Image (cartoon, rainbow, N blue to C red):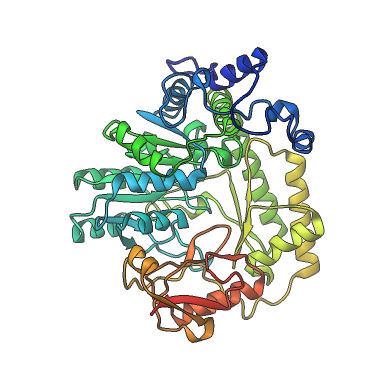
């Protein structure tokens, strides 16, 4: 059992809500459904247990914008469980955590060093604050077609060439489970007087799993955005922002309050509280089992033939410094199918919903709620898909990552005068909006980047294969906004 010096058996927000429920308070405040009485259909759908604690901030329940009692206690317990100096409960998803992290570190005109294969929330933050990205273009695995981690020498080069940059941001891990040498990057950033920020949207379990890659806080990073609702078990849209001892917590709270709601959901906050307790008490045991299940599934899928469920054999000591063994990433091109095609077949014909499929790979996201029998069903379905649908893969695109040509900052491009052009007439123009497949939400194009033949080919191919294209003003992506 995992214990720390604070009593991790506590769940102060949950406890306060249970006390509130027993008090039978008469509500003359918001929300207007009044403990569900005013909206019987919603109550029937979600249940009285749920709507009865969908309440407003009040003295006994504290206030997320300025916590002084139960929310503050919950944040202290979270900081303790995750080995951070401070933790902030976030109810706007990890997007909100990532943006608060970047906005804390950066002001208008500041440079920030980061890989280009970041989630759109990072670049959104640059649009908001006016910081300028310095991209470390990741190495690409030529067989798998995926972008890898940040190479140490590339980070060192970026730091040397941009000594006034204020921070280095690292994905820990990537969507595919690949980790950079985080400890080394933290040292390089700190030696240069820069902060090190970690997007740990897919790394919550690193804090509670033996044999998993190092967590951001353990590696000495200054801030980390941790997506509790992904592998941590909390409700969708709930997240944590963790900070180290050198980051001013009061300023971080002010940054968060610039954009986060003043009406924090107690459903989301209590789910964070209960889930943190569960991870602190049982996380190590749980994620050991998850890693074992994923390893078993990798072996079984690879035994089918044609597929490649990749793992720690990819480690190269640098751009693939470590690998998250709970991630079940599978390369599909060798059976002649794009990842998104396998994704669609699994859902439509086998009632199996995986996390995503892209041009060459699929990802099945394993966590605490998965069971061996469901994994057996997935393996069987993949074997049957190979038997039924395998074909010649000639003509399939094999590279996910397209190196961008950055012309201007995301903020300048986003707010500049723009015109709408048919997609096929946009070659050579500078994009002023986002284009991405979602998930994973990594932009093919971001504001300020030049539109090239290669990018247009990727967009056309992704649309043809059935990827969900998002980010552009035109929902059908027949037209694209470019600088006038």
**Which of the 4 quarters of the picture holds residue 219?**
top left
User: Is residue 184 in view from this perspective?
Assistant: no
Residue lying farthest to the front in this orientation: 28
Image quadrant for the N terminus? top right
Above/below status of 62 relative to 462 = above
Please state the total of marks drawn on the protein image: 0
* Between 180 and 221, the one nearer to me in the picture: 221
**Residue 247 vs residue 480: left or right?**
left
Looking at the image, which residue is at 59% across and 31% down?
Answer: 30
Percent of width and height locating residue 39? 74, 36
Percent of width and height locating residue 457? 53, 79
Looking at the image, which residue is at 75% across and 65% down?
Answer: 386
Above/below status of 62 relative to 295 = above
**Residue 199 vs residue 381: left or right?**
left
Looking at the image, which residue is at 24% across and 50% down?
Answer: 166
User: Is residue 194 in view from this perspective?
Assistant: yes
**Which of the 4 quarters of the picture holds residue 231?**
top right
* Between 96 and 307, the one nearer to me in the picture: 96
Image quadrant for the C terminus? bottom left
Percent of width and height locating residue 170? 38, 50
Percent of width and height locating residue 23? 64, 13
Residue lying farthest to the bottom in this orientation: 425
**Which of the 4 quarters of the picture holds residue 464?**
bottom right
């Amino acid at each position: 059992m995992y214990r720390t010096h604070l009593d991790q058996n506590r769940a102060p927000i949950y406890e306060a809500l249970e006390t509130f429920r027993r008090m039978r308070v008469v509500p003359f405040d918001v929300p207007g459904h009044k403990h569900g009485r005013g909206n019987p259909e919603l109550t029937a759908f979600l249940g009285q247990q749920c709507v009865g604690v969908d309440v407003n901030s009040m003295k006994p329940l504290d206030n997320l914008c300025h916590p002084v009692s139960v929310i503050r206690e919950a944040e202290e317990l979270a900081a303790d469980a995750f080995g951070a100096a401070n933790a902030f409960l976030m109810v706007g998803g990890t997007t909100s955590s990532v943006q608060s992290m970047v906005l804390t570190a950066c002001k208008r005109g500041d440079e920030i060093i980061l890989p280009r294969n970041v989630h759109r929330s990072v670049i959104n933050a640059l649009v908001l604050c006016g910081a300028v990205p310095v991209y470390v273009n990741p190495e690409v695995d030529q067989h798998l077609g995926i972008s890898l981690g940040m190479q140490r020498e590339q980070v060192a080069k970026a730091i040397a060439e941009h000594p006034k940059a204020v921070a280095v941001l690292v994905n820990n891990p990537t969507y595919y489970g690949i980790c950079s040498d985080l400890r080394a990057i933290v040292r390089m950033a700190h030696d240069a007087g820069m902060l090190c920020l970690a997007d740990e949207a897919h790394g919550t379990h690193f804090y509670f799993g033996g044999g998993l890659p190092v967590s951001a806080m353990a590696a000495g990073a200054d801030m980390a955005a941790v997506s509790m609702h992904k592998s941590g078990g909390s409700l969708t849209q709930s997240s944590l922002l963790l900070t180290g001892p050198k980051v001013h917590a009061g300023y971080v709270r002010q940054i968060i309050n610039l954009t986060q709601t003043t009406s924090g959901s107690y459903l989301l906050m209590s789910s964070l509280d209960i889930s943190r307790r569960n991870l602190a008490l049982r996380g190590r045991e749980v994620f050991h089992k998850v890693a074992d299940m994923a390893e078993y599934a990798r072996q079984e899928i690879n035994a089918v033939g044609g597929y490649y469920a990749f793992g720690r054999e990819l480690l190269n000591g640098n751009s693939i410094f470590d690998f998250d063994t709970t991630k079940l990433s599978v390369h599909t091109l060798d059976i002649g199918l794009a990842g998104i095609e396998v994704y669609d077949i699994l859902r439509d014909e086998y009632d199996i919903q995986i996390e995503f499929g892209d041009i060459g790979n699929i990802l099945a996201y394993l966590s605490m709620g998965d069971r061996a029998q469901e994994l057996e069903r997935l393996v069987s379905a993949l074997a049957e898909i190979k038997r039924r649908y395998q074909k010649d893969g000639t003509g399939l695109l094999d590279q996910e990552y397209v190196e961008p040509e950055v012309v201007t900052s995301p903020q300048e491009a986003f707010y500049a005068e723009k015109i709408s052009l048919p997609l096929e007439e946009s070659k050579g123009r500078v994009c002023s909006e986002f284009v991405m497949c979602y998930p994973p939400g990594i932009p093919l194009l971001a504001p300020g980047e030049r539109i090239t033949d290669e990018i247009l080919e990727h967009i056309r191919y992704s649309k043809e294969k059935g990827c969900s294209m998002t980010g552009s003003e035109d929902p059908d992506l027949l037209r694209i906004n470019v600088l006038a």
